[in-house]
Image: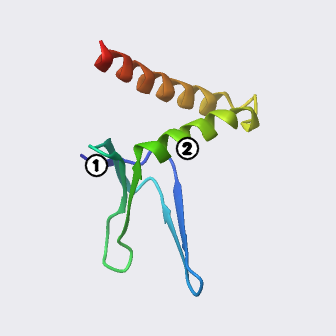
Amino acid sequence: MTRPLPDKAEVALEYPDKLYIGTFDRASRFEAHLDTTGLALTLERPGEAEMRKSVHLHLNYGLLAEILRDIASTVAKLPADDILHREALSEAASALHRAFRVNNS
């Protein structure tokens, strides 16, 4: 089930001879879920054909775990006074942790 984006997302896909950049704003939607091999993430911008776009990304569990570790190691770079983002990220990480604990019980 897709949901509205609560914030902005930017995607850049770089090839040797081309660069594609897409911005997804609050008018866009997203879906994220775990499947049998990893994380599936979809960003969609609805609308007329010339404005419509989507990005589909799949990260296997090993890579996703390393990404989460890298994120954890850089939390100190988030400004201490950015309470809104710090709390939102902390609450989301706690929810993920609780979900794993419940499923392991």
Name the residue at 58% across, 25% down. Answer: 87
| Foreground of the two, 74 or 81 | 74
- State the scheme by which the image is colored: rainbow
Residue 89 drawn at (x, y percent): 55, 31
Residue 14 drawn at (x, y percent): 57, 75
**Which residue position is annotated with label 1?**
2
**Which residue position is annotated with label 2?**
67
Q: Secondary structure at mark 2?
A: helix
Q: Earlier in the sequence, mark 2 or mark 1?
A: 1
Residue 35 drawn at (x, y percent): 28, 44
Query: Contact (CB < 8 A) between labels 2 and 1?
Result: no
Question: Relative to residue 31, is residue 101 depicted above or below?
Answer: above
Q: Quadrant of residue 97?
A: top left
| Foreground of the two, 92 or 103 | 103
Name the residue at 63% across, 40% down. Answer: 70
Q: Is residue 2 left or right of residue 79?
A: left
Q: CA distance from mark 2 to mark 1?
A: 23 Å
Q: Secondary structure at mark 1?
A: loop
Question: Relative to residue 27, is residue 88 depicted above or below?
Answer: above
Amino acid type at mark 2: Ile
